[in-house]
């Protein structure tokens, strides 16, 4: 059974093409290969200025992808099949959460250390979201 991959919209203009979903035929592909394919296929929206940050979620956060990075950084074993990390809802799926232009290193470190994520609304905001 194929899995679904959904990503957030990045702006009102991007909403015109929503929902942003991709059917992935093989849930047994290694997570690292899937993430590389998402980048290669330009599935993630690019941002003017070149600094968009994304979190790939399954049962938990799996990886951070950034427009300015050449490859994702994984929070889990990238050689494990995607099926091990899927949300078991119908259909089984993964989500890509847009974190605006937040520093991807900060997002990765917060996820890895179990700390709250930096606000995606800018440094002036004290609010965590």
Image (cartoon, rainbow, N blue to C red):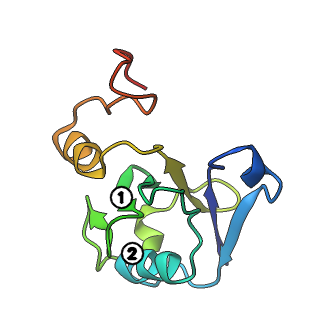
| In-image side of 48 versus 77 (left or right) | right
Image quarter in which the C terminus is found: top left
Q: Residue at x 25, y 58 (%)?
A: 75
Element on which disc 1 rests: strand
Residue 124 drawn above or below residue 18 = above
Q: Which residue is mark 2?
A: 31
Image quarter in which the N terminus is found: bottom right
Distance Cα–Cα, label 1 vs label 2: 9 Å
Q: Marks 2 and 1: in contact by CB < 8 Å?
A: yes
Element on which disc 2 rests: helix
Q: For residue 103, which numbered disc appears in the image?
A: none
**Where in the figure is residue 119, as x and y percent of width and height?**
38, 28
Q: Residue at x 57, y 56 (%)?
A: 88
**Where in the figure is residue 51, as x and y percent of width and height?**
41, 55
Residue reaching furthest top? 126
Residue reaching furthest front? 49
Q: Quadrant of residue 4?
A: bottom right
Q: Which residue is mark 1?
A: 62
Residue 32 drawn above or below residue 91 = below
């Amino acid at each position: 059974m194929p899995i679904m991959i959904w990503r957030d919209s990045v702006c009102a203009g991007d909403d015109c093409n929503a929902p942003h979903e991709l059917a992935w035929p093989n849930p047994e592909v290694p997570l690292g290969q899937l993430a590389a394919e998402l980048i290669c296929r330009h599935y993630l929206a690019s941002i003017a200025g070149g600094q968009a940050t994304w979190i790939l979620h399954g049962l938990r956060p799996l990886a951070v992808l950034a427009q300015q990075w050449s490859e994702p950084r994984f929070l889990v074993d990238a050689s494990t099949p995607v099926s091990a990390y899927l949300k078991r809802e119908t259909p089984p799926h993964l989500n890509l959460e847009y974190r605006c232009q937040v520093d991807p290193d900060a997002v990765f470190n917060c996820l890895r250390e179990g700390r709250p994520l930096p606000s995606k609304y800018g440094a002036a905001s004290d609010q965590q979201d």
